[in-house]
Amino acid sequence: MATTITNFLPRVPPSSLSSSLQKINSTSHSQFPILTFPSSTNLLRPKSRTKVSTNSRTPNVVVSKATAAPGTKKAERDEKVQQVHSVEEFDEALRAAKNKLVVVEFAASHSYHSRKIYPFMVDLSRTCNDVVFLLVMGDESEKTQELCKREKIEQVPHFSFYKSMEKIHEEEGIGPDQLVGDVLYYGDNHSAVVQLHSREDVEKLIEDHKVDQKLIVLDVGLKHCGPCVKVYPTVIKLSKQMTESVVFARMNGDENDSCMQFLKDMDVVEVPTFLFIRDGEICGRYVGSGKGELIGEILRYQGVRVTY
């Protein structure tokens, strides 16, 4: 699966992407007691979301150890996930994170889906040391209701992703695999996947590996591209398994003008596109997010015969 790149190209320069993100879910509401999506933006299946209520007198919920809900005693012991209780605490946590990725789950004590996804966020917080994880219980108090209102949270669980105090992505009604993919894609500082930010970075990488003749696999994508997010965990796994013979790198084409020009020069019209480079020459490419197909193409350009 691939996405036509023109579907994601902004009509404004990349520097204006942050202002465009602020317009997401910008429908205003005069009352906050029941948060609900307007029908025009209702993108979730009915069973995958929960309305957030400001009624602090929520019923008690029986929770098993495997699905301990945010806000329970178990959640309090998950010290890697910081629970915030007000706008001020939230803004201070974003400031303290500096340029690290911040993943925020907006949840509610009565939400089955909040309980279901929360343990996976806790697991991620224990393995992703360069990512900050925050929890906001929307129905905890008037202060958390005010925070949800400011951030335009209308359904839970809702995940927002921030860097340098700027919202860069958000998701609703997602499962564990999507959450893992998002965290890896937006917060990866993994040394085995080289992050490229300009054409000069690409040229230097190619020059560095002319001598060892390693195959370079360059993952070209966009910041907000579902298929790019989907395949990226596979890229990370392969980068750990093929360190002796393959160099993995990635570039987001809409990061800056230099990256976008590189995509144009390489005739990249769909993302994700994987460019295979050896001895300073592009020897092939694969367009799509199929894990098996990608592995097969990498092996083929390594000289391994692949039969289907």
Image: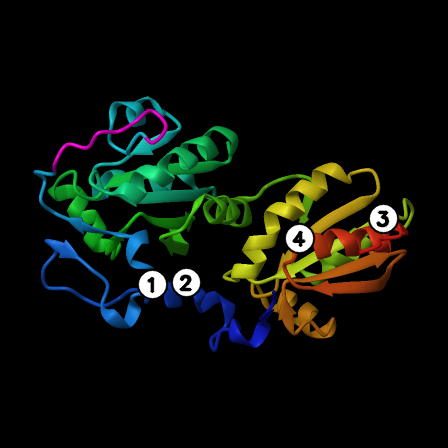
**What residue type is disc 3 on?**
His
Residue range (magenta): 59-67
Q: Secondary structure at mark 2?
A: helix
Disc 4 from disc 2: Cα separation: 31 Å
Name the mark on residue 209: 3
Asked which quadrant contains residue 283, the reply is bottom right
In terms of secondary structure, what is the magenta stretch mainly?
loop
Asked which quadrant contains residue 256, the reply is bottom right
Disc 1 from disc 4: Cα separation: 33 Å
Q: Is residue 64 magenta?
A: yes
**What residue type is disc 1 on?**
Gln
Query: Comparing marks 4 and 3, which lies closer to the viewer?
Result: 4
Using residue 33 as the reference point, say whether residue 44 is left or right of it. right
Q: Residue at x 66, y 53 (%)?
A: 291
**What residue type is disc 2 on?**
Ser
Name the mark on residue 18: 2
Q: Earlier in the sequence, mark 3 or mark 1?
A: 1
Q: Count neighbours of disc 3 (C-alpha within 10 A) and say few if under 14, some if 14 to 19, many if 20 or more.
A: some
Q: Which residue is mark 4?
A: 291
**What residue type is disc 4 on?**
Lys
Q: Which residue is mark 1?
A: 22
